[in-house]
Image (cartoon, helix red, strand yellow):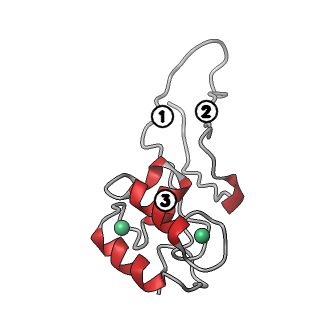
Amino acid sequence: MSTFQFEEVVLPAAAYHSTFRLRIRCTATPGAFDDWFVDNVGLSGGCAFPCGDIDGSGGPVDLQDFATFSLCFGGLPSSSQGCACSDLNGDALINLEDFATFSLAFGGISANPAPDCP
Ligand SMILES: [Ca+2]
Ligand SMILES: [Ca+2]
């Protein structure tokens, strides 16, 4: 049996895109044999922009940010960068709690990225 180890790779914020691919090769067994399984593979990401700047445009939190937030409301943070930024408290839900935080950020500029919103 092969021995595996846990590997975690921290990607730069600019690496977030919708065509992420993960390639896993078995190099321990010669020939065309598959003697292993890969499971518990996860991909997690977060918002690369300051709290409330959901569209990443910079500047104060505005109606463009709200437009993206409303499209993501009730959805999954993993569905897009904008939805990742809409999960303002990092609980993997986009709900009224996030809206409350968004409302506080509206019109301002935060130094912290979600989910570390003030
Ligand atoms: Ca913005
Ligand atoms: Ca949330």
Whether residues under marks 1 and 2 lie with C-beta atoms below 8 angstroms apart, the answer is: yes
Q: Which mark is residue 52?
A: none
Whether residues under marks 2 and 3 lie with C-beta atoms below 8 angstroms apart, the answer is: no
- Residue 39 figure quarter: top left
Residue 35 placement (x, y as % from top left): 50, 22
Whether residues under marks 1 and 3 lie with C-beta atoms below 8 angstroms apart, the answer is: no
Q: Which mark is residue 38?
A: 1
Q: Residue at x 50, y 73 (%)?
A: 114
First of labels 1, 3 by sequence position: 1
- Going by the numbered disc 2, the residue's amino acid type is Ile
Which label sits in the foreground, 1 or 3?
Answer: 3
First of labels 1, 2 by sequence position: 2
Q: Is residue 12 visible?
A: no
Q: Is residue 100 above or below residue 70?
A: below
Q: Which residue is mark 3?
A: 68
- Residue 113 figure quarter: bottom right
